[in-house]
Amino acid sequence: MDRLLFILGILCPVWLWGQPSAVISLQPERMETGDTTVLLLFLNGTNTEPGEVDFFPWSDQIPAQNIIKRSSWKRSGAQWMRRFTLIAFDSASLKLPPLKVRLSNGTMLETNTVQLLVFPTAGGRELTDMASIRDIRRESSSWIDYWLYGAGGLALLLTLVWWWWKNRRLPRPVEVPRELSVPPPAPKSASDEALSRLNTLLHKQYWKHDRVKDHYTEFSLILREYLERQFQIPALESTTLELNTLLAHTEASSAFQTRLEQLFTQADMVKYAQSSPNTATHQDIIEKAIQLISNPQTSAAKPADTSNSSNPSNYRI
């Protein structure tokens, strides 16, 4: 075989040595089914070792699993050589297209075409004739053939280790301390709730954002909810005039009712009469309401308090 390789290397065309070229040859070109043939690949015109050989053009005639041996590239003078061992199981006359070889610079170089004749193995009529038929080449056993059994055994071992680790020491029950029941906070009184909301409204300062009407609407709502909780009257559904009648039947003092009426009248003028009080009035009305709710029994109407609701200079209609 080595002498044959030497002769093929000499007989390759000399002009191929000047530029990259690839030549393939099958030895032998005729064989029986189940036999092997050697594919020799010679490459000239390059000093660096070539890359892989693309067998895709042969995939429909000689599958990749039929290439049972592959040698590495070997240098012989100015020529590179590589050897492949092929096997065929179906009888046919194959015309194999060119293969492609990747060079070190990334270009693909095509080889020549070859022909392979695979004829069926002759068989006799007698059983004794089968003695000359060669046996199937059997693949040597490998541990990879038993990887599934190994994986199953490893999984079983890991399961046993996990079960032992989990049950080797049972955790002691931990006593959970009893949580002391904390009574819910007592609800705020009507006056405390109203005072808290009035202070919040004072800090919002709606008038600085051109929301004067929202300021007086929320102010009126806070007072009505306070009256409804404090005196158990339907203040939210009543008008200002109806509130005066309802408060007359409660323990509210007359001074408290008079001053409360002034506050509601001042708020209604902004909500319904489209009046525009000055900036100081917005804060003053909340302070008056806080004073009224803080001291409902001692509140008395002051002459100066009525000036904000009756003085035309404080409103623009």
Image (cartoon, rainbow, N blue to C red):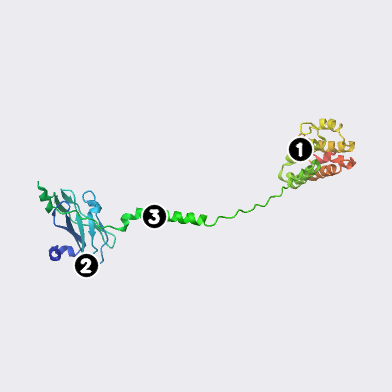
Please say whether residue 208 is visible from this viewpoint: yes
Residue 173 horizontal side relative to residue 266, left or right: left
User: Which percent across, then down, holds residue 285?
Assistant: 81, 42
* Residue 77 vs residue 21, the one in the foreground: 77
Q: Which residue is mark 1?
A: 221
Q: Which residue is mark 3?
A: 153
Earlier sequence position, callout 1 versus callout 2: 2
Residue 198 horizontal side relative to residue 177, left or right: right
Which amino acid does the dot numbered 2 rest on? Arg
Of the residues tagged 2 and 3, which is closer to the observer?
3
- Marks 3 and 1 in Cβ contact (< 8 Å): no
Residue 158 is labelled as none
Q: Quadrant of the C terminus?
A: top right
Q: Quadrant of the N terminus?
A: bottom left
10 Å neighbourhood of mark 2: few (<14), some, or many (≥20)?
Answer: some
Of the residues tagged 1 and 2, which is closer to the observer?
2
Q: CA distance from mark 1 to mark 2?
A: 101 Å
* Residue 213 vs residue 179, the one in the foreground: 179
* Residue 280 vs residue 159, the one in the foreground: 159
Please say whether residue 275 is visible from this viewpoint: no
Earlier sequence position, callout 3 versus callout 1: 3
Residue 75 is labelled as 2
Q: Residue furthest bottom?
A: 77
